[in-house]
Image (cartoon, grey):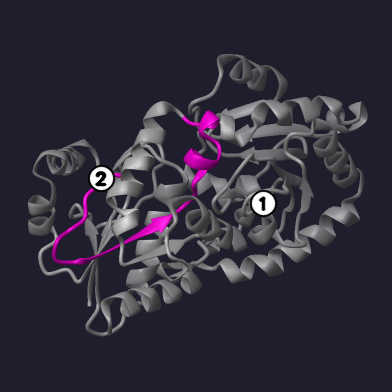
């Protein structure tokens, strides 16, 4: 069985989807069975680095591959068929919005927030996701959903038959389980993620201002993540009211996460929630939202709050920052729960999925 996975996100500025592609393909290749082959389109064979701010391949290797992606918009299926010749399955990403004629088509559903919460997305993102759904998702032989919540969203919103969608949770790398806490001069509460409206950072800042003053003097609020589509006013507040680190290289992230007193992640909607799982794997207590997939992923290993309530978020922060024993108890439960999200498990279930789609 030959599976070609669209790895175009590895060539672009991207966060969660790029992490998924990078770790997933590497894990699939590590567990590949005799007679199977995992290829990466467009001819991305070496996934040696994870760089969120740009392509891991460098300009001269990236440019012709991006040109091929652009050419698909003109030549469509004949060019895709030629590029993936010999493949039994083509696993599409949102960058390739056409279906091959010979290989069976699959894709991963990360989230449906463009339908659930269009107000927190740009018009371009909404158009791209809806085109991808119309041209790829509705015609796929099978789909992977990264959480059961995402699977149910796809059934309800897109009308996809339940039997076509398999829930396979994403993973977390061993570097988080083995992380050594990084040094910072003061203990800190951490937020990790791209700065965009869906991540609800203005409400987190409101909640932080409502945390008891003696705790705010003892703990810093540290925000790590590149600037995305975020209001200038919120960005100005982040710089004034938190220790804003900007983009943190991937190699430094496990230590930063492991060193936190707790992770605060009051997102308005998530498909899987990588920062939550990474914090749990690193033995860090988590405060996160009671919506979307987050209760499914975190279970009893996090304090769940209404993300639209600064008072409720602040109460959870106060409780955990005041009690080291409560933080330790949550961290212990989180560490145990994170074991179910190893990339090895995700890859094994994904290979079973591909074999089923290929009929082997």
Q: Residue lying furthest front in this view?
A: 159
Q: Pinpoint residue 144: horizontal percent, then vertical percent.
A: 42, 63
Label 2 crowding class (10 Å Cα cut-off): few <14, some 14-19, many 20+?
Answer: some
Q: Is residue 93 left or right of residue 122?
A: left
Label 1 crowding class (10 Å Cα cut-off): few <14, some 14-19, many 20+?
Answer: many
User: Between residues 97 and 328, which one lies in front from this camera angle?
Assistant: 97
Question: Can residue 94 be seen by looking at this rendering?
Answer: no
Q: How many marks?
A: 2
Q: Is residue 324 magenta?
A: no
Could you tell me which residue is drawn at 36 percent across and 70 percent down?
A: 28
Could you tell me which residue is drawn at 68 percent across and 17 percent down?
A: 240
Q: Is residue 299 left or right of residue 51?
A: right
Q: Quadrant of residue 122?
A: top left
Question: Can residue 40 be seen by looking at this rendering?
Answer: yes
Q: Pinpoint residue 198: horizontal percent, then vertical percent.
A: 58, 35
- Residue of label 2: 57
Q: Secondary structure at mark 2?
A: loop
Residue 148 sits above or below residue 225 on the image: below
Could you tell me which residue is drawn at 77 percent across and 25 percent down?
A: 206
Q: Secondary structure at mark 1?
A: helix
Residue contact at pointers 1 and 2, CB within 8 angstroms: no
N-terminal-most mark, 1 or 2:
2
Where does the C terminus fall, quadrant-wise?
Answer: bottom left
Q: Which residues are magenta?
A: 95-121
Residue 200 sits above or below residue 260 on the image: above
- Residue of label 1: 258
Q: Quadrant of residue 187?
A: top right
Q: Pinpoint residue 186: horizontal percent, then vertical percent.
A: 77, 35
Q: Which mark is residue 99?
A: none
């Amino acid at each position: 069985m030959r599976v070609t996975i669209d790895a175009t996100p590895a060539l672009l500025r991207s966060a969660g989807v790029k992490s998924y592609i990078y770790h997933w393909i590497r894990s699939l290749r590590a567990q590949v069975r005799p007679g199977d082959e995992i290829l990466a389109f467009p001819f991305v064979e070496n996934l040696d680095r994870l760089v969120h701010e740009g392509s891991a391949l460098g300009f001269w290797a990236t440019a012709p591959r991006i040109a091929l992606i652009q050419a698909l918009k003109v030549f469509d299926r004949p060019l895709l068929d030629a590029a993936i010749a010999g493949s039994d399955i083509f696993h599409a990403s949102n960058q390739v919005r056409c279906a091959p004629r010979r290989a069976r088509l699959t894709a991963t559903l990360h989230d449906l927030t463009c339908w659930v919460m269009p107000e927190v997305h740009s018009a371009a993102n909404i158009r791209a996701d809806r085109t991808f759904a119309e041209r790829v998702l509705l015609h796929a032989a099978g789909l992977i959903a990264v959480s059961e919540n995402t699977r149910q969203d796809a059934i309800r919103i897109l009308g996809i038959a339940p039997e076509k969608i398999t829930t396979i949770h994403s993973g977390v790398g061993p570097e988080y389980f083995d992380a050594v806490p990084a040094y910072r001069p003061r203990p800190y509460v951490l937020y990790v993620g791209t700065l965009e409206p869906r991540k609800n950072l203005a409400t987190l800042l409101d909640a932080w201002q409502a945390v008891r003053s003696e705790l705010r003097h003892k703990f810093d609020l540290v925000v790590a993540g590149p600037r995305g589509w975020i209001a200038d006013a919120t960005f100005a507040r982040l710089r004034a009211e938190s220790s804003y680190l900007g983009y943190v290289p991937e190699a430094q992230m496990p230590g930063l996460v492991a060193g936190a007193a707790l992770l605060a992640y009051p997102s308005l909607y998530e498909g899987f929630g990588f920062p939550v799982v990474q914090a749990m794997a690193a033995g860090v207590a988590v405060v996160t939202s009671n919506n979307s997939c987050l209760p499914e992923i975190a279970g009893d290993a996090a304090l769940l709050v209404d993300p639209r309530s600064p008072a409720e978020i602040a109460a959870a922060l106060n409780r955990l920052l005041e009690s080291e024993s409560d933080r330790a108890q949550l961290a212990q439960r989180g560490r145990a729960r994170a074991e179910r999200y190893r990339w090895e498990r995700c890859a094994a279930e994904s290979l079973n999925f591909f074999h089923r789609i290929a009929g082997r």
